[in-house]
């Protein structure tokens, strides 16, 4: 007869494992949320039309200024040509009726 050895089975032993530190909750910075108000379509259209009219008026004014400068240069050119043709000197006057008053 052989002796049977009974092997005791050891019960598993629970070991205390150190817990990782609990992270503290970090409060994120407050996020600002802006509410965007929008114009209604009719008001937006009125605003766009007013802007377009303003830009058109500005362009017309620039064109008028350029045309005025061109006219002024043309006028001065004619005066210069008349001064050369009629031997005018500084102080001579051309009247509206076309007569020339010479400086004395």
Image: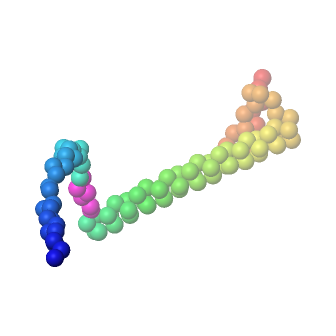
- Tell me if residue 25 can be seen: no
Q: Verify whether residue 40 appears in magenta.
A: no
Residue at the outermost top position: 104
Percent position of residue 52, x then y: 43, 61
Q: In the picture, which quadrant includes the N terminus?
A: bottom left
User: Closest to the observer: 2 or 81?
Assistant: 2
The picture quadrant where one finds residue 97 is top right
In the image, residue 7 above or below residue 75: below
In the image, residue 6 above or below residue 83: below
> Range of the magenta residues?
34-39
User: Closest to the observer: 51 or 65?
Assistant: 51
Percent position of residue 12, x then y: 15, 60
Tell whether 20 sits left or right of 104. left
Residue at the outermost bottom position: 1
In the image, residue 35 above or below residue 79: below
Percent position of residue 60, x then y: 53, 56
Tell whether 44 sits left or right of 26. right
Query: Total label count?
Result: 0
The structure residue drawn at horizontal position 73% and vertical position 41%, both measured from the top left corner, is 76
Percent position of residue 19, x then y: 19, 48
- Tell me if residue 54 can be seen: yes
Q: In the picture, which quadrant includes the C terminus?
A: top right
Q: Verify whether residue 35 appears in magenta.
A: yes
The structure residue drawn at horizontal position 65% and vertical position 46%, both measured from the top left corner, is 69
């Amino acid at each position: 007869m052989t002796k049977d050895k009974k092997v005791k089975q050891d019960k598993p032993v629970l070991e205390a494992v150190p817990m990782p530190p609990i992270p503290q909750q970090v409060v994120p910075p407050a996020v600002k949320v802006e509410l965007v108000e929008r114009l209604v379509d009719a008001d937006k259209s009125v605003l766009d039309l007013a802007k377009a009219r303003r830009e058109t008026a500005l362009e017309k004014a620039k064109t008028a200024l350029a045309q005025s400068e061109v006219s002024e240069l043309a006028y001065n050119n004619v005066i210069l040509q008349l001064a050369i043709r009629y031997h005018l000197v500084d102080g001579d006057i051309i009247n509206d009726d076309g007569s020339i008053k010479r400086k004395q």
